[in-house]
Amino acid sequence: MRSIVLDEEKYEQAYLANCIFDARNLKGNSFYLTKLFSTSFKNCILENIDFTKADLSYVDFSNATLFDVKLNKCDCIETNFRNAHIENANMQDSLFDSSDFRNATLSNVILSFSNFEEILVNGMTLNNVKGFDKIIDISINITDFDNPIILKGEEAIYWLRNNALK
């Protein structure tokens, strides 16, 4: 097993796929334009991290805390945010396709111009979310992968406002 010491602040335009950073506290790092797919950040505390334009497909952020993060212009295909706490995040102009947000809490986040395709939202909590009216496309799965109930467009927004927005 190889280990990586993140003593640098910038990992811009790097290829760090299939890495394991579980249960680490990372602060002030930049992963701008970095390919991080299939990397694990389970149980991490990530503060002031820049993931702008990163490929976060298949990344596992389950049970992680993401505070003051930039997740704008990211590709998040099947990204796992289950039980994550995301606060003060810029999530604009990103693609979230089949991502898992079950039991996640999103507070003070900006979602403008993003696409949400069949994301899992059961148990998700939204606090002070901005940009609902500027989401490009949305479809949500309000159950699970095995028995999906998919809501699209205005019906999905309505469900989120009535079931997740606090």
Image (tube, rainbow, N blue to C red):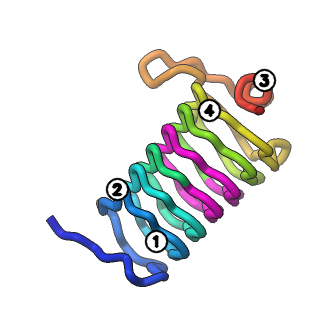
SS at circle 4 = loop
Q: Which residue is mark 4?
A: 124
Q: Residue 7: horizontal and vertical position, in percent? A: 38, 82
Residue at the spot 60% in from the left edge and 69% down from the top edge: 48
Q: Nearer the viewer, residue 75 or 128?
A: 128
Q: Which residue is mark 1?
A: 34
- In the image, is residue 89 part of the stretch drawn in magenta? yes
Q: Residue 1: horizontal and vertical position, in percent? A: 14, 64
Q: Nearer the viewer, residue 12 or 124?
A: 124
Select label 2 or label 1 by which is in front. 2
- Specify the segment rendered in magenta: 66-94
Report the Cα–Cα distance between label 1 and label 4: 27 Å
Q: Residue 22: horizontal and vertical position, in percent? A: 34, 56
Q: Which mark is residue 22?
A: 2
SS at circle 2 = loop
Q: Residue 2: horizontal and vertical position, in percent? A: 18, 69
Q: Which mark is residue 162?
A: 3
Kind of residue sitting beneath label 2? Asp
Select label 1 or label 4 by which is in front. 4
Report the Cα–Cα distance between label 3 and label 2: 34 Å
Compare marks 1 and 4 and give the one earlier in the sequence. Answer: 1
